[in-house]
Amino acid sequence: MFQRYVWNPLKCVLSGIRFAYRDRSFRLEVLLGVIFFPFFALKFWGTLQLLLLSVGYFIILIAETINCAIEKAVDFTSRDIHPLAKQAKDTASAAVLLALLNFALIFIYCFFN
């Protein structure tokens, strides 16, 4: 029962994270988090600001993961360049940009307050 409801889904999740980590953009965002979060933790330790920065950062990772999935699904379904495929990929990329802008606003708020 443990294997069916916990272990097997966890293996799928870890496989998805490994797949997303193969994407250059996802790796860059993880690297930036590893570099900057010690600074954030020292400056904002124990505050609501650290929580806001953490949530904003994980929204970026979530958006990038979904972007990777959409891009691979579109690439799998069609090798041809189709306007709808381009729209799907561009919209997924726009979600990542919005997540980055969201994080920038949170950072500006936290840093100057």
Image (spheres, helix red, strand yellow):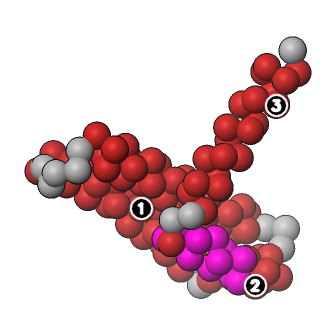
**Membership of 6 in magenta stretch:** no
Q: Residues within 10 Å of mark 3 (few under 14, many from 20)?
A: few
Q: Which type of secondary structure does the marked residue at label 3 adopt?
A: helix
Question: Which quadrant, please, contains the N terminus?
Answer: top right
Q: Residue at x 79, y 19 (%)?
A: 4
Question: In x, y percent, where is residue 59?
Answer: 55, 56
Residue 96 numbered tag: 1
Name the amino acid type tagged 2. Phe
Place residue 51 in its image quadrant: bottom right
Residue bearing mark 2? 39
Earlier along the polypeptide chain: callout 2 or callout 3?
3
Residue bearing mark 3? 7
Name the amino acid type tagged 3. Trp
Along the line of sight, the residue nearer the viewer: 104 or 35:
35
Range of residues picked out in magenta: 25-36
Mark 3 or mark 1: which is in front?
A: 3
